[in-house]
Structures are given as structure tokens and as C-alpha cells.
Amino acid sequence: MVKQLIIFFKAQLSAFIGGLCDYGIMIFLTEIAGMHYLFSIAVACILGAVVNFSLNRTWSFYSRSRSYKFSSTQQLVRFAFVLVSSILLKIAGTFLFTSFAGIDYKISRIITDMIVSLGYNYVLQHFWVFKKTAGSGQWQ
């Protein structure tokens, strides 16, 4: 149980660090560069995902004594699928909160990111992208 919590918190910390990069780039592209917030979300998510993938692969889900079921290339392909679907969820969620609830896009994005990060990204990354080999124990 302790190992499970450590992996979860490490994954959340790496998501937070990637999210800070992502959020900062979104604000810059929208407020300074004048890009529409929905487009800036897509660009920023890709850049923040590079940070998140790197941290997850080398730190959050890494184990010296266990091996991954999938190669780095396979993980990257799987991560790309999660990334694209995550971007679509974040754009849709931010748009819905902003357009229909009247919440500023910066706040809408934070709300949406929290939902997508915990309910979607973490689950798929942990059990699908960075899956351990049979017998290695998922939580190791």
C-alpha cells in the first residue's frame, strides 16, 4: 500500500511539474502572443507532455528491479494516444466551463486539468503506458 501511494504521489508531482510548464505556455500564447485559448491549450499540452512523459518514465513509474512490458517506442506511441485524447478532453472541458458556466478560461483549464489528470491520464499511464511485465507487480 505504501508503494502504491508513493507511485501515485510521484506521478502527481510529475503531472504538476508538466502542468506548470503547460499552463505557463498556454497563458503566454494566449495573453502575449494573442493565440485563441483553445489553440494555445493544444500547443501547451504537447510541450508539457514532453516534461511529464520524461519524468514518469525515469522517475514516477521507474523501478530498477522491474521491467516494463513495452519498449520505449511502444510506450511513446501509447503515451501519444493518451496525449491526443487528453488534449481533446481538456479543450472540450475548458470550452464547456468557459462558454456555458461563464468561468474564465484560466480557471476552467485548472478545473478541467484536475479532472482529466486524476480520472484519465494517471489511470492510463499507470496501467497501460508504463505497464510492468507479468510477475513484476504493477506497484513495484
Image (cartoon, rainbow, N blue to C red):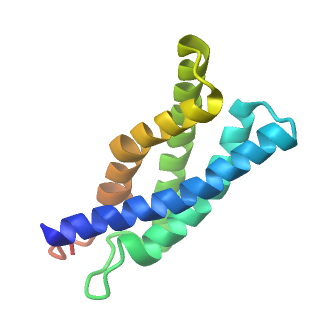
What residue occupies the far top of the structure in this picture? 100
Relative side of 70 to 137, left or right: right
Task: Estimate the x, y position of residue 91 in percent, counting from the top left.
Answer: 59, 31
Relative side of 133 to 79, left or right: left
Can the viewer see residue 100?
A: yes
The vertical placement of 32 against 54, above or below, is above
Can the viewer see residue 131?
A: no
Task: Estimate the x, y position of residue 104 in percent, counting from the top left.
Answer: 63, 26
The vertical placement of 14 against 100, above or below, is below
Task: Estimate the x, y position of residue 49 in percent, counting from the top left.
Answer: 58, 57
Query: Which one is in front, 94 or 88?
Result: 94
Q: Residue at 36% x, 77% y: name it.
A: 62
What residue occupies the far bottom of the structure in this picture? 64
- Quadrant assignment for the N terminus: bottom left
Task: Estimate the x, y position of residue 25 in percent, counting from the top left.
Answer: 72, 51
What residue occupies the far right of the structure in this picture? 33
The quarter of the picture where residue 137 lies is bottom left
Query: Which one is in front, 79 or 123?
Result: 123
- Quadrant assignment for the C terminus: bottom left
Relative side of 77 to 125, left or right: right
Q: Residue at 79% x, 44% y: name it.
A: 29
Relative side of 68 to 98, left or right: left
